[in-house]
Image (cartoon, grey):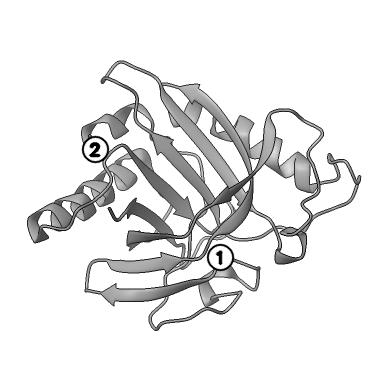
Amino acid sequence: MFSKVVMVLGSWLVASIAAATLPSTSTSHDICHGLQCPKFVVLNKTADWELRHYEATKWASANVTAMFKDEVGNQLFQYLFQYISKDNAAHTKIDMTAPVVTKIIHGQGPNCESEIIMHFMLPFAYWDSPIQPTNPAVTIQEIPAMDVYVRSFGGFAKDSDYLDNLAKLSGDLVVAGFPIEDAYFFTAGYDGPYTFLNRHNEVWIKKN
């Protein structure tokens, strides 16, 4: 249930999958700031949300079980950043991509820990033969193709911002009668701490 997100949202920065105003399968959308990002097409768009179809994507991932995302976000980010900064089997630097995506799988109850999984997309050149991590906390995963409902918002996102936008998105979809996944959700955003204007954050919910 989406009420459980209080237990897992943090104030640290995350990055997210880009919004697109027209259907596109380009490898870098405007919101990606020139970085490679997952390919998607926009299937439907309203004033408040859009439905995107994402192709299957290869990611470097790190996960932990915790009550609060802000307890573990920096740790997970550092695991992944070290992986692309030569802490890998090839001792080579891997280009950063956009977005960083965090999947939060709800615990069994309001006082139960949730599984928090952070992802860096691998550059396309590494999809066929991914460079293996040396840190056992980092794994290579493929996220299958999926359709997600996306709500975008700006500013320096805080817990309350993600909660508010997630509640608005899920509420709109339930009222409209669209079947959605309620066992987990994603948070995402693009911008580092030194980007002050035109920041972009998103929450998204998988279509069932």
Q: Position of residue 54 (x, y in %)?
A: 46, 65
For the residue pair 156 and 203, the one nearer the viewer reads as 203
Image mark for residue 25: none
For the residue pair 164 and 87, the one nearer the viewer reads as 87
Residue where numbered disc 2 is placed = 2
Label 2 SS: helix
| Type of amino acid at the residue the image marks with label 2 | Phe
Residue at figure coordinates x 78%, y 38% from the top left: 133
For the residue pair 12 and 166, the one nearer the viewer reads as 166
Splitting the image into 4 quarters, where does residue 163 fall?
A: top left
Residue at figure coordinates x 28%, y 75% from the top left: 44
Splitting the image into 4 quarters, where does residue 96 fall?
A: bottom right
Q: Is residue 121 above or below residue 27?
A: above
Please rate how many residues cluster around mark 2, counting C-alpha atoms within 10 Å: few if below 14, some from 14 to 19, many from 20: some
Q: Residue furthest top?
A: 111
**Which one is in front in this view, the residue at disc 2 or the one at disc 1?**
1
Q: Residue furthest bottom?
A: 22
Residue at figure coordinates x 22%, y 34% from the top left: 1
Q: Position of residue 59 (x, y in %)?
A: 63, 50
Residue at figure coordinates x 56%, y 65% from the top left: 38
Residue 137 appears left or right of 145:
right
Labels 2 & 1 near each other (Cβ < 8 A) = no
Residue where numbered disc 1 is placed = 38
| Type of amino acid at the residue the image marks with label 1 | Pro
Q: Is residue 163 above or below residue 67?
A: below
Report the number of numbered marks. Answer: 2
Q: Is residue 67 above or below residue 62?
A: above
Residue 207 appears left or right of 167:
right
Mark positioned earlier in the residue sequence (2 or 1): 2
For the residue pair 15 and 181, the one nearer the viewer reads as 181
Label 1 SS: loop
Residue 170 appears left or right of 71:
left
